[in-house]
Amino acid sequence: MSSRGAVPIGLGLGRIANFINQELWGAPTLVPWGCCSRAPAARRAIARHPTQLYEALLEGGVMFVLLNWAGAQARPAGTLLAIFLIAYALVRFAIEFLREPDAHIGYLAGDWLTMGQVLSLPMFAIASPWLFAIRKR
């Protein structure tokens, strides 16, 4: 296996560990695949989105395929890193909508903007023009 597959596999395994350790809670849900767990502030176990598994699939599996596909052809230096940062930022931003925000931070704006989304924005904002510049060369 090439080194471009190591990071997504590590991220995927890390998210599975988050699921096993019951960390990074998903928001309460009524979907049939919701997992019952007890968040620290909850008095009883309720079904929650298994966001850790969503991220394991997207950050681990999908990004593994994406990076190996993109890396199969010769590309300018920095292309795979830019693709990785863009994909990671998009996945994190999207999954945060299904995650319960950190208890000590809460939502930063309204009932939807979380710290994870805010931290994903600079990655996307830097990597997108960078990828565009690399492709223009």
Image: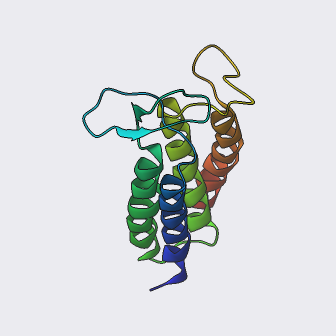
The x, y position of residue 127, in whole percent, is 65, 51
Residue at left offset 54%, top offset 69%: 10
Total number of numbered labels? Answer: 0
Where does the N terminus fall, quadrant-wise?
bottom left
Q: Is residue 61 left or right of residue 100?
A: left
Where does the C terminus fall, quadrant-wise?
bottom right
The x, y position of residue 26, in whole percent, is 48, 36
Rendered view: 133 above or below 119: below
The x, y position of residue 99, in whole percent, is 52, 34
Residue at left offset 62%, top offset 24%: 113
Judging depth in this view, the residue of 86 and 115 nearest the camera is: 115
Q: Is residue 94 left or right of residue 132?
A: left
Extreme residue toward the left, this view: 32
Extreme residue toward the bottom, this view: 1
Residue at left offset 48%, top offset 78%: 74
Identify the colour scheme used. rainbow
Judging depth in this view, the residue of 86 and 46 nearest the camera is: 46
The x, y position of residue 30, in whole percent, is 31, 26
Rendered view: 123 above or below 9: above
Judging depth in this view, the residue of 23 and 76 nearest the camera is: 23
